[in-house]
Image (cartoon, coloured by chain):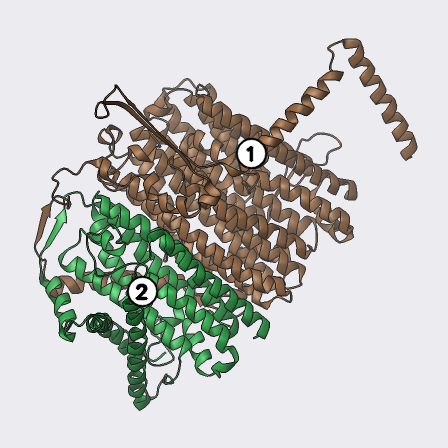
Chain colours: A brown, B green
Amino acid sequence: MELFFILQLAFYVLGGVFSLFASAEKENLSRATHLLAGIAGGCGMVYSLAVLFGAPQVSYLFPAGLPLLGSLEFVVDPLSAFFVFLISFLSLATSIFAIGYTRTSQLQKGVPLLGFLYNFFILTMVLVVTVRNIFYFLIFWELMSIASYFLVVHKHERPEARRAGFIYFVMTHIGTAFITSAFILLFVNTGSFQFDPLSAHAPLLSPAWKNGIFLCALIGFGAKAGMIPLHIWLPEAHPQAPSHVSALMSGVMIKTAIYGLLRFLFLFLGKPFAWWGSAILIFAIFSTLFGVLYALMEQDLKKLLAFSSIENIGIILLGIGMAVFFSATNQPVLASFAVVAALYHVMNHAAFKGLLFLSAGAVLSQTHTGNMENLGGLIKKMPWTAFCFLVSAAAISALPPLNGFVSEWLTFVSLLMGFKSESVGIRFFAPILASLLAFASALVATCFVKAFGIIFLGTPRSKCVSESREVDFSMKLGMGMLAACCVLFALLAPVIISLLGKVAQQFFGSEVLSQHFVRKAFLIDPAGLSQFAPSWAFIAIVVVVLCILIATRVFLGKGTIRIGPSWDCGVKALSPHMQYTATGFSKPLRRIFSFLYQPTRRVEVEDEGHEILRTARRFESKVHPFFEETFYRPLSKWIGIVSQKVKAIQTGHIQLYLSYIFVTLVLLLIFLRLSR
Amino acid sequence: MNPIPSVLQVLLVVTVAPSVSWWIKKIKASSQNRVGPTLLQVYSDLGKLFRKGMVISNQASWIFHVMPYILFSAVLVAASMVPIFFKGSLLGFSGDAILFVYLLVLGRFFMALAALDTGTTFGGMGSSREMTLSSLAEPALLLSFFALAYHAGTLSIEGMVSHFGSQSPLQILFFGSLAFGAMLIITLAESGRIPIDNPATHLELTMIHEAMILEYSGRYLALIEWGHQIKQFLFLSLLVNIFFPWGLAEPGAGAALFLGSLFFLIKIFSLAFVIGWIEVHTAKLRLFRVPDLLAIAFVLAVVSLLGQLMIGQ
């Protein structure tokens, strides 16, 4: 199995190098590069699945390394294998999609560089989740951030791309700073750069240290995951990247933060404290609600999807929060159920959000606009894309019998297992959180009815649509694979859960058995609250639909159908602009939650003296960006002021700088002497 | 699971559902000194729709054609999870209250999409309003289920019904009644009745449900209407069986099943009378007042949960 690991890395390197240096034609180049990335993904799936199914863990010691920092060792244990699997299967689909996508007119230039960065980006993600050394983890983490930064600013001639890149760069480095501090605090305690001694040393950590490290890790990884209020980069950066990259960023890159968080919470820090769980739950529910509330107000398709990623990170964190809580109160079986719920949602989100971004890419490549107000009626022009978008929209809205519902059900039950908790607070708040989750998921359904309905249904709202046609085969194949995953991940739920149980075992020891979660086709919860059989639900729905179809056909015959225009109230002139717009669709919610959105609208009418001879009309409607205005604007202002003050010691004379260095050196020597 | 009575239950739901709608219509008619339709009228209406041909918009895509089937099947699968006259159901083992609620969401999701499909203003209007109001109703509905689940120790609908059936209700009478209040409001919202929506109007700017299905005709309309009646019936049977579980038969008893169904019919028609009474005595709320009503339902559910936590399991 080590062979497959090395092969995967080698194919990414090969694909990247090939893309930069080969002088092949553009078409063949993109085909070769992305095929290599796809093959690498296939290799990754082989060994990661093998490890999850019980093969011994894969480990590989890189023969060279930097001195003093420990060895560059890669180990694929069940947790890493799960994330390698995610990265591999999603990148397989996006690579196939990218073969066609990079040839579309949108991305004509910079394809060699894009292919290089794409391969490099996936490579760094695989390295991040497999490496077993603090120092190299940070290096790969940073490389991953930089690769994704360059992908975000791929269209650097556009000012909004540069702005998004800048915000992303700043936020991700704030995150990295906190992650680095968390690791340094761990290192100070153990004196080792390798991961395994850290886990072994966990019980010896003092509570204060543990709390400090936890906070650093939560903020650091939270910033990468897009947890509110550290999310502001996400809705800016994801839409700017090419769509197959956005799919990877939303589908797996932000999940590497979940990987890091899980490693810290359950392996490096030993037994967690109960308040950590509460803290995570608070951040989680805010991310869930605000993520979807802001997604609802978006008219830009990719921004909408980016906000919805924040919501899904919230759902994942709800599972993790409950897991931390149960783990702190010595209920390992319940804790592992909650971990399984979170991991299951991580996987499902990769599938359906990947698919959503890919189909958004397909729409963009044809219509050249992501603004929903200019779209409409695409289902007739692009039936396959529309079908794939519908499957993923239904999955993300947690509709049975698709995969989104399975993980949402698991999360609901994890929250309701709070009934079995000793603490009265959690017994009360856990079901309240569950009902807020229900609220959020109903809003997600609203949001995706809006997205699908406005973009694909109705009549075209502008010329952008009329020139579009269905995308080519490779793009259809890439999307189709993920659509199949949305169904498969629901049907295979019992198998998947027993595999995820192995990850939970790694956290909570061998007393956790998959019999606690799965009985034949049924998913059960260890608290005995409920059971659910995804395959039964699927069969029931399909069978009943077929029965009714056949029954109406048999008993009533084919029936006569007349085709006519839609009902126009007798006006005889239904125009596309009479349809509901995306803005109009979310108007009731904008009004109900106006305390949050604080919407403003401006209507400008220009006329030349006569009211009926209007020359121009402009309408503007905005919602108040709460977090940007409340947290970040004052913060950046404050940083500006401080920088002005600091300027006083920055005179530009080299002598002065030399003396600064000298003074620092002396101080450090004194400190060293004293600390001996 | 007893297959024969379970299937009978589903058949009962499917056949009796239209007559509950008739009963409510009749109550409204008699309050207005009208005679109202006969019982056969509702069935012959459905039959006529089923036999009629259809006029379909030239803008419609396949979503428009599959929606009635998905809606009806989702409601039917949901119906097979609810105990009606005995403490069991056909598919109750395959899922719980959460699945039940989300099956209804499945139908609604497609209905809202089909409304947008024909490119009319009314469709968009209905779709937007329906999704907005249902997003506000859903947390309250699930929270009342959760509050009941805390006491019953199970999330399955069967489990809850048999738990409350074997318990003296006095212990949680007060807090249970709060959950009942919450669910009653949600029932009004989900079945599109006054004060949330007016099922008796067409082409009015206040409509929600009717606006979505304006383009439908023939057998599609029949399936939608029937599905809607079944959905309303399901909510009513949940209310009577969870909160007034008297007379429910044990699984397997022969003659008791007959008595059980008799009891059930009496209970459900009395509850439908209450719905009709509310409809006669209240005016429709302005659209932006409805969230307040749904917020009341949510608060009732919260208080019910809190109270049951205080009393203990």
Residue A30: where, in percent of width, then height?
39, 26
**Disc 2 crowd, CA 10 A, few/some/many (<14, 14-19, 20+):** few
| Kind of residue at badge 1 | Thr
Q: Report the side of A497 relative to A75 (left or right).
A: left
Q: Mark number for residue A237?
A: none
Q: Secondary structure at mark 1?
A: helix
Q: Report the side of B280 relative to B138 (left or right).
A: left
Q: Report the side of B19 relative to A131 (left or right).
A: left
**Disc 1 crowd, CA 10 A, few/some/many (<14, 14-19, 20+):** many
Q: Report the side of B240 relative to B298 (left or right).
A: left
Foreground residue among A381 and A87: A381
Q: Residue at x 16, y 69 (%)?
A: B42
Quickly name the residue at label 1: A124
| Kind of residue at badge 2 | Thr
Foreground residue among A626 and A496: A626
Q: Quadrant of residue A107?
A: top left
Q: Farthest residue to the front: give it.
A: A609
Quickly name the residue at label 2: B282
Q: Residue at x 47, y 65 (%)?
A: B300
In this picture, is B154 found above or below A303? Answer: below
Q: Quadrant of residue B156?
A: bottom left
Residue A170: where, in percent of width, then height?
59, 29
The CA distance from mark 2 to mark 1 is 64 Å
Residue A390: where, in percent of width, then height?
32, 46
Q: Are marks 2 and 1 in contact (CB under 8 Å)?
A: no
In this picture, is A425 found above or below A59? Answer: below
In this picture, is A552 found above or below A184? Answer: below
Callout 1: chain? A
Residue A98: where, in percent of width, then height?
38, 32
Q: Is residue B124 visible?
A: yes
Q: Report the quarter where the N terminus of chain A lies.
A: top right
